[in-house]
Image (tube, helix red, strand yellow):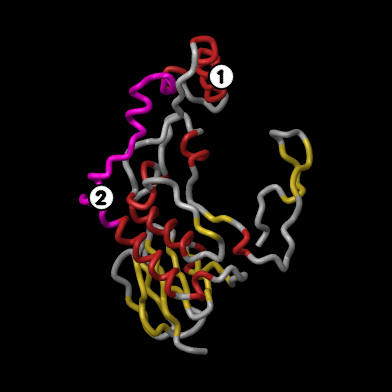
Amino acid sequence: NHGFVYDGRLSAHRGRVHGAPLDRDAQRGRLVGYAQTHDQVGNRAKGERISQLASTERVLIAAGLVLTSPFVPMLFMGEEWAASSPFQFFCDHGDDLAQSIRDGRRREFASFGWRPDDIPDPQSLDTFTRSKLDFAELTRDPHARVHAFYRGLVALRRTNPDLAAGTKCVARIDGDGDALVVERGSFAVAANFGAAGVDVTLPRAAARIALSSTPIEANGDKLALPHASIAVVVLVSA
């Protein structure tokens, strides 16, 4: 609903108030939504992707929420198949600048508790090589499973205007605080972040499950979500 983290609040990094609130009537399709970016990954000490920090099930939840949101979805290269290669900061500069970059990154990450020796050398060819995508992963699980799920989500968004609309949506917490239900016109998106299965209530009865990260069954307006799962549900007409 707010659109921006810094909507006029104090930024400790900048040492001043920063940003402005989003117009309440603004189309959410003017905003970009994502689970990860080159900045978030490349500016981590070791360049880990979300798929290296979370289970495949939770990666699928993130994908489902991004690609059914009212925002313009942005995917980071390799995200669509949970690429196993990191995206580490690398560069190719002359000696003086190269050493300044090495020292600066080590100082920066030391302030977050990382050991300087754990920071990849940005000038090393190995750092660049480790960061290259391995497209052969597309034929192997869990990468093939993740890729198929992303393709399914993109197809749903492309063929259903309600999922592509940039209008505000209704979202609520369910399942004793572990689940999220988002209403998107004729669809509902239900996600269970918890470690146990939960039952959630849909806005209306389910007509069918359009896509889910694991087999899920609906009974009227009730949906039984296994742990760490997500479903895109077609609702009966209002």
Q: Quadrant of residue 22?
A: bottom right
In percent of the image, x 59 and y 72: which residue is there?
170
28 with respect to 18 (left or right): left
In percent of the image, x 44 and y 65: which residue is there?
191
15 with respect to 61 (left or right): right
The range drawn in magenta is 119-145
Residues tagged 2 and 1 counted as in contact (Cβ below 8 A): no
> Crowding at label 1, few (<14), some or many (≥20) Cα neighbours within 10 Å?
few
- Which SS class for mark 1? helix
In percent of the image, x 40 and y 64: which residue is there?
154
Circle 2 or circle 1, nearest the eye: 2
Measured as percent of width and height from the top left, residue 156 is found at 40, 70
- Give the distance between the C-alpha atoms of the residues marked 2 and 1, in whole angstroms: 36 Å
- Which SS class for mark 2? helix
Measured as percent of width and height from the top left, residue 72 is found at 54, 60
Measured as percent of width and height from the top left, residue 93 is found at 49, 18
Closer-to-camera residue (1/229): 1
Q: What amino acid type is highlighted by mark number 2?
A: Leu
Closer-to-camera residue (197/94): 94
* Residue 138 tag number: 2
* Residue 104 tag number: 1
32 with respect to 213 (left or right): right
Q: What amino acid type is highlighted by mark number 1?
A: Gly
Closer-to-camera residue (50/176): 50
Measured as percent of width and height from the top left, residue 238 is found at 52, 89
Tell whether position 116 is magenta.
Answer: no
* Residue 125 tag number: none
Q: Is residue 79 above or below residue 41?
A: below
> Crowding at label 2, few (<14), some or many (≥20) Cα neighbours within 10 Å?
some
Q: Quadrant of the N terminus?
A: bottom right
